[in-house]
Image (spheres, rainbow, N blue to C red):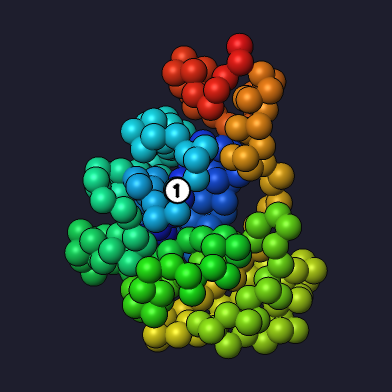
Amino acid sequence: MKLGIFGGTFNPIHYGHLRAAEEVQAKLNLDKIIFVPSGNPPMKDRELADARNRYKMVRLATFKNRSFTVSDIEYKKKNKSYSVNTLKELQRHYKGARLYFILGIDAFIDIPNWWQPDRLVMLADFVVISRPSFKFAGLSSSPYIEADNNILKRLDSGKIESYKTALAGGRNIIMMRLTPIEISATLIRKLLYQGKSIKYLLPEEVESYIISNKMYKLKV
């Protein structure tokens, strides 16, 4: 079984997240994408909604897709959540499965600052996906991969869509260019603060949940 592990704050989840998961699942022929909303992340943003609401929004956003499922592995933790521990627990739960850890370019660049990064890169194959304002060429300085800078530039230019190479620790890393979608959780929160519409940026079920629970200082 091949499982994609898609972690994040999802603050809130939106169509950019969902489309990325859909494309990764299709391109790698994964059996499932497991969304893992963070519970109490090590570096908490002051604008972060509580874990319960974020978990519920991810459930609402994904329940119609049979290839998507949601894990409460971090949501239920009272202590801080670290990706290295999450992947270990998922390995135990899905014995024999091959895990693909999905994250954006910006997150992968920051991996050296994560908890136990040397162990983390040994636990799963990594899928690094394109993100607005970030370039794959920026990965050339990463201590965890040996990438051909010319190929990274071809990814950035759109001449190729993906590039697979070795990841430190014996696993693989797949860099993947996805359909660019200029939607961000930051933008959605900003619109809500301003009392503006967020329609068509995220699923209707999530929009309704945000409005009914008066989340993100909604001014309506």
Mark 1 surroundings within 10 Å by alpha-carbon count, few (fewer than 14), some (14 through 19), many (20 or more): few
Spot the residue most to the front: 46
Q: Is residue 139 above or below residue 100?
A: below
- For the residue pair 66 and 142, the one nearer the viewer reads as 142
* Residue type (three-letter) at the residue carrying disc 1: Lys
- In the rendered view, does 91 fall on the left or right side of 107? left
The residue sitting at 76% across, 75% down in the picture is 154
The x and y percentages for residue 142 are 58, 80
SS under mark 1: loop
- For the residue pair 136 and 85, the one nearer the viewer reads as 85
The quadrant in which residue 203 appears is top right
The residue sitting at 54% across, 72% down in the picture is 174
- In the rendered view, does 160 fall on the left or right side of 108? right
The quadrant of the image that shows the N terminus is: bottom left
The x and y percentages for residue 182 are 71, 44
The x and y percentages for residue 59 are 38, 34
- Location of mark 1 (residue): 44
- For the residue pair 204 and 77, the one nearer the viewer reads as 77
- For the residue pair 7 and 115, the one nearer the viewer reads as 115
